Image: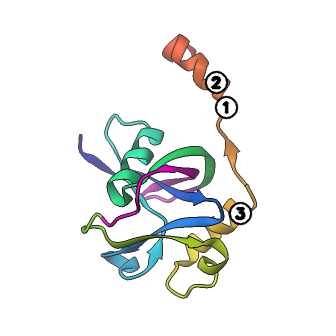
Amino acid sequence: MDDNCFASVGAIVMQNDEVLLVRHTYGDAAGKLLNPSGYIKYGEMPYDALRREILEETGVNINPNGLLSVRCSTKDWWLVFLAEYISGTPCSDKNENYEVLFMPCDEALIHPDVTKSTKILIKLAKEKRIFTINHEYEKLLSVYGMMFS
């Protein structure tokens, strides 16, 4: 499956009061700390893409808890989820990032290397401003499939 280069997912991954950050290697965010994210592959669902991207980039398994933010422009869409740490040792993919770490949220909010957009997302996460996952709806979809479309 190829990346679509249009729709992407990201996460604010929390472990207690710490947030998972990556130090980026390219683009405008090169050298900066930000939340991990990546493109959805063709035919992939957002939650599956999120779990895959976080694991590939950080070595960490997560559980998404709900939608935190949506950014849409004419060139791309970005869905950001609040997620909880499940397992794994944070480690760099040595490609898109060269450092992966958990940082206390209060420190991340004032750290000069953390991007402004990531700081905003951390604030939203701390305030639990999310659209929660409706597990009853997910169960119905698995039973009835696309019958509701």
What residue appears at the point 57 percent right and 51 percent down from the top-left corner? 83
Answer with mark 3 or mark 2, whichever residue precedes in sequence: 3
Q: Is residue 62 left or right of residue 134?
A: left
Query: In the displayed image of the protein, which residue is found farthest to the right?
Result: 127
- In percent of width and height, residue 16 lies at 64, 60
**Magenta-span inclusion, residue 75:** yes
Q: Nearer the viewer, residue 23 or 80?
A: 23
Residue type beneath disc 1: Asn
Q: Are marks 2 and 1 in contact (CB under 8 Å)?
A: yes
Q: Which residue is mark 2?
A: 137
Residue type beneath disc 3: Lys
SS at badge 1: loop
Give the label on residue 126, or none. 3
Region in magenta: 70-92
Q: Are marks 3 and 1 in contact (CB under 8 Å)?
A: no
Separation (CA) of disc 3 from disc 2? 26 Å
Counting every numbered tag in the picture gives 3
For mark 3, does the 10 Å Cα neighbourhood hold few (<14), some (14 to 19), or many (20 or more) residues?
Answer: some
